[in-house]
Amino acid sequence: MYCQSNDELNTLVNEARKVTKDGKVADYIPALGKADPNNLSVAIHYPDSNCISAGDIERKFTLQSISKVISLAFVLMDRGCEYVFQHVGMEPTGDPYNSIAKLETMDVAKPLNPMINAGALAVTHMIKGSNVVERFQRLISFIQSMADNPDIGYSKEVAQSEFESADLNRALSYFLKQHGIIDEDVEKLMDLYTKQCAIEMNCLDLARIGLVFAMDGTDPINGNHIIPKEIARICKTFMVTCGMYNASGEFAIKIGIPAKSGVSGGIMGAVPGKFGIGVFGPALDDRGNSIAGIRLLELLSNKYNLSMF
C-alpha cells in the first residue's frame, strides 16, 4: 500500500533522531546488534485508509515484545478472560521486564502482568495447537489478518539467535513450570516464543495493527471485526499501564497514548478512535525502549494533543 511522505513528520523525525547518539542497539541478542542505531522511521495509519510517513518505512524489523500484546489478544479470544487471568495478573511492576524477583516474593508465583517476560511466556504457553508449528501458524495468521498482509513472516536468523541466548527466559519458564503456571516442555515453549518475537514487519504493517487496536478491534478499512471490543479494551489498558516496560508511568504522563515497545526498536501506538502508529528506531534507552521513538512520540503528542488523559 502507498504511504505518503509528510514534510511535517519528516521535520519531527529529524529532530527526534538527534537523541539516537544517547542510545544503544540490543546487542545482547547478537542478530539485533547488527541494526544501524541512527535509523528512525514512522507511519501513521488513519481509518479512512490514508497514511503518512517519514523515514524508511519499508525497512523490516522484528516485533520482539510488541508481540506480547498481540498474543494476549489472541489467547484471550482462544481461552477467555477468566482462564487467562487465573495464570497471569493485571498489575504493573516497577521491575525490569526480564526480572524474576516478583515471582519469588509473591505468595502465588504467577506473573504480575502479560507484558513482562514471565507473563508473556505464560500467555504464549496458552496458544492452542497440537505442536509448535500449528500454534505458531495460528498466531502468525492472526497477525497477518490484523496487518492485512498475508506476506508477513518471521526472521529465522533472529529466532535462532534468541533461542541460543534465551537462558534467562528458560529460567523464568522453569520457575513457572515448578509452580504450575505452565506444564509443557520448556524447549518447545522457547521455540514458539522466540519465533513469536522474531515475527517481522515494517512500520506500515505495525501502524495498521495499531489502527485495529485504536478502533476497538475492527479494521475500518476492510470492515473486518478481528478482535472483540472488550478484548481490545483490555489490551489497550495493558499498553497504557505496562506497555513501555518500567517506563510506562512516565510515558503515560508525557505522551499519554496506549503503546507497546520491543527491544528491536519498534513501538506500536494506538490513539483511541483516531489512528495507529508504527515507529522503528533501534537505538534503545536504558529501559529497553527506542530512545528516538519515544522522543518522536512525545513531539507528536505535544504538537497534536494526542494524550488521552
Image (cartoon, helix red, strand yellow):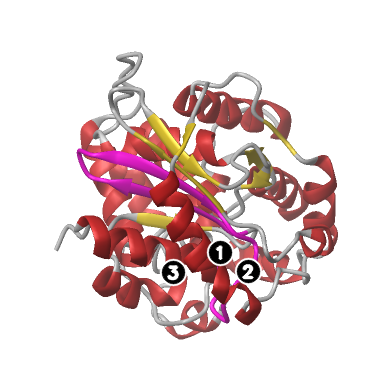
Q: Earlier in the sequence, mark 3 or mark 2?
A: 2
> For residue 77, what is the image quadrant?
top left
From this viewpoint, is residue 32 visible? yes
- Which sits in the foreground, 186 or 229? 229
Q: Residue 168 at x, y = what percent?
A: 71, 72
From this viewpoint, is residue 109 visible? no
Query: Which label is found at residue 295?
Result: 3
Kindly identify the residue that appears in the image at 49 percent across and 21 percent down.
148
Q: Residues within 10 Å of mark 2 (few under 14, many from 20)?
A: many
Q: Earlier in the sequence, mark 3 or mark 1?
A: 1
Kindly identify the residue that appears in the image at 49 percent across and 58 percent down.
13
**Quick one: SS at disc 3?**
helix
The three-letter code of the residue at mark 1 reads Asn
Query: Which label is found at residue 117?
Result: 1
**1 and 2 marks in contact (CB < 8 Å):** yes
The three-letter code of the residue at mark 3 reads Arg
Whether 231 is drawn above or below 297: the answer is above
Q: Where's the C terminus, which quadrant? A: bottom left
Magenta region: 265-290
Whether 179 is drawn above or below 69: the answer is below
Can you name the residue that lies furthest to the left here?
309
Viewer-nearest of discs 1 and 2: 1
Residue identifier under label 2: 172
Q: Earlier in the sequence, mark 1 or mark 2?
A: 1
Kindly identify the residue that appears in the image at 46 percent across and 70 percent down.
245
Q: Residue 254 at x, y = what percent?
A: 28, 73
Q: CA distance from mark 3 to mark 2?
A: 32 Å
